[in-house]
């Protein structure tokens, strides 16, 4: 597999030209941030959970993003309906299984979604991917914790078990479709100080899937754009803290340049 900053930049420019509609059923904590981040990326967000229009919205969307962070009704029913519509209309969709190993409700709900349709990509933190791989839950609330494995083989195991592409984000990001395997090394610690940055990555993966049919390449593009933008945002925010970083992150996503990606991208293809 060959992947370069130039390929990622081409997809990013294609995304900005096409402005794909991303139907994002995400958790209540991060809806505003996710919508604004998608706009900064160049996509068009819609977040309706109204059952009467979900099928139509999925049909016209470029991709679907499902995030179970606040798994209340009617959100759960809307996500199942949206997953079914994505399968019917052959739309790519991303599942973000927030804290899947923390409670029986979340485990059962993720199981229901996976039984309804196979996601194009599952994006989670280390603990979430560990739980999906059958390696146990090492999270703390909805956070990744410090003991969850982020080893490439754990991600490949999760991908093989789920029959799809899996992205584990953390200090080192890992992507696998059960065969191919890569690691990415960009980002900044301030990403962990702003709620919803992982959720935004999942939405970005959906946006890249709207223009890139290979989920491994789409995932690498989404993660890289977010993490390189985070490095630029940290430079711009200086020592002002996570509040300023959050604002600078949106600006950096919007103003990302080809030379930024080319100069900073750190990506290793393992197989």
Image (tube, rainbow, N blue to C red):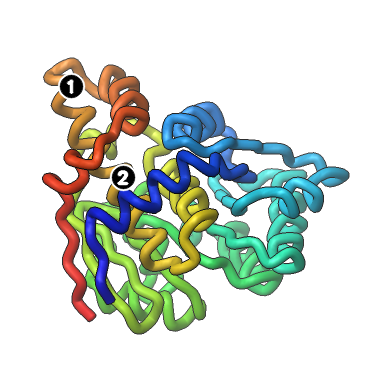
| Closest to the observer, 174 or 221 | 221
Coordinates of residue 16 in the picture (x, y in percent):
46, 39
| Residue located 49% across and 40% down the image | 17
Circle 1 packing at 10 Å, graded few (<14), some (14-19), many (20+), is some
Q: Is residue 229 visible?
A: yes
Q: Quadrant of the N terminus?
A: bottom left
Crowd around label 2: few <14 · some 14–19 · many ≥20 (10 Å): many
The image quarter in which residue 199 lies: top left
Q: Hey, which quadrant is residue 86 in on the image?
A: bottom right
| Residue in the picture at 74% in, 41% down | 49
* Outermost residue toward the right in this view: 52
Quarter of the figure that contains the C terminus: bottom left
Q: Where in the figure is residue 51, as x and y percent of width and height? A: 83, 46
Reading the image, the residue beneath label 2 is 225
Task: Please name the residue shown 35% across and 73% down the image.
Answer: 176
Q: Which mark is residue 236?
A: 1
Marks 2 and 1 in Cβ contact (< 8 Å): no
Q: SS of the residue at dot 2?
A: helix
Q: Can you give x and y, in whole percent of width and height, for residue 151 in the image?
A: 23, 71
Q: Earlier in the sequence, mark 2 or mark 1?
A: 2
Q: Is residue 1 left or right of residue 53?
A: left
Q: Secondary structure at mark 1?
A: helix
């Amino acid at each position: 597999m060959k992947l370069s900053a130039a390929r990622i930049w081409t997809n990013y420019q294609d995304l900005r030209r096409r402005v794909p509609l991303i139907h994002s059923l995400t958790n209540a904590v991060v809806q505003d941030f996710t919508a604004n981040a998608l706009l900064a990326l160049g996509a068009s967000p819609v977040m309706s959970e109204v059952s009467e229009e979900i099928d139509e919205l999925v049909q016209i969307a470029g991709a679907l993003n499902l995030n179970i962070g606040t798994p209340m009704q009617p959100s759960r029913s809307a996500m199942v309906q949206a997953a079914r519509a994505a399968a019917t209309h052959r739309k790519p969709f991303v599942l973000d299984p927030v804290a899947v190993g923390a409670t029986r409700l979340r485990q059962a709900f993720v199981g229901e979604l996976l039984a309804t349709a196979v996601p194009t990509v599952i994006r989670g933190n280390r603990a979430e991917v560990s739980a999906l791989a059958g390696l146990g839950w090492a999270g703390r609330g909805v956070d990744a914790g410090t003991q969850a494995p982020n080893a490439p083989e754990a991600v490949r195991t999760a991908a093989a078990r789920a029959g799809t592409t899996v992205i584990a984000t953390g200090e080192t990001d890992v992507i696998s479709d059960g065969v191919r395997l890569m690691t990415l090394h960009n980002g900044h610690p301030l990403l962990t100080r702003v709620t919803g940055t992982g959720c935004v990555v999942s939405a970005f993966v959906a946006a890249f899937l709207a223009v890139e049919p290979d989920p491994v390449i789409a995932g690498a593009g989404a993660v890289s754009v977010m993490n390189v933008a985070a490095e630029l945002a940290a430079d711009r925010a200086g020592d002002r803290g996570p509040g300023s970083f959050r604002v600078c992150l949106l600006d950096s996503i919007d103003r990302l340049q080809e030379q930024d990606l080319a100069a900073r991208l750190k990506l290793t293809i393992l197989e």
